[in-house]
Image: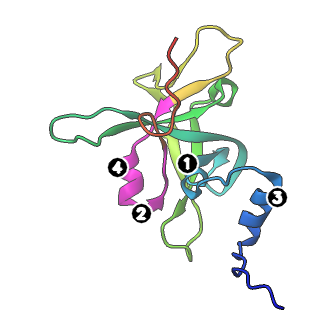
Amino acid sequence: MQKHSKPRKRYKPTEQLALERKMGLIPPFFLDSVVAIGIGEPTSISWFASGFLYGSYAPSPKQPNRYEVFLITNRHVFEGKETVWLRFNPKKADQPARPFLLSLFENKKPSWLSQQDNSIDVAVIPINVRLLTEQQMEFNYFRSNLHVADVKS
């Protein structure tokens, strides 16, 4: 007598590995939220750090889905520098990643913020996502109202 069973579902290798390790898969947009940070001249950039993009939900009557987007990285990445390069991938996969120069000062004042406590190594700077969109760069960001835990005291 033959047993009849349902055909087993076939998983992609990454899905199978996640199941075997009992861990969740990273949503694809998380990878587009990560940014490489570099220093140097346009022809010889040294990529030495990373950060991630975070969008703070800031709706307005005209733009109910508006976000203010920031780059989050370590304070020591920005300290002592006037500019850094950020590397983004284009939407068209056949094109190479592109560097964008980010000024860390505006009117001779730092345009980035950090905690006053020097033991907290975090820095935040606003990002012009309109420019990235116009240049057809692939990027995403963690949304404060969707991807962040709401912890109540």
Which residue is at 76% across, 57% downward? Answer: 18
Residue placed most toward the observer, 145 or 125: 145
Q: Magenta segment, which residues?
A: 125-141
Of label 1 and label 2, which has the lower sequence position?
1
Of label 1 and label 4, which has the lower sequence position?
1
Relative height, residue 51 to residue 15 (above, below): above
Query: Which residue is denoted by mark 1 in the rendering?
Result: 33
Of label 3 and label 1, which has the lower sequence position?
3
Residue farthest front in this picture:
1
Relative height, residue 32 to residue 39 (above, below): below
Q: Amino acid at mark 3?
A: Glu
Of label 3 and label 4, which has the lower sequence position?
3
Query: Going by the image, does 83 lie left or right of 2?
Result: left
Query: Going by the image, does 81 lie left or right of 113?
Result: right
- Between disc 3 and disc 1, the foreground one is 3
What element does badge 2 sit on?
A: loop
Mark identifier at residue 20 = 3
Q: x and y percent of residue 78 in the render?
A: 62, 29
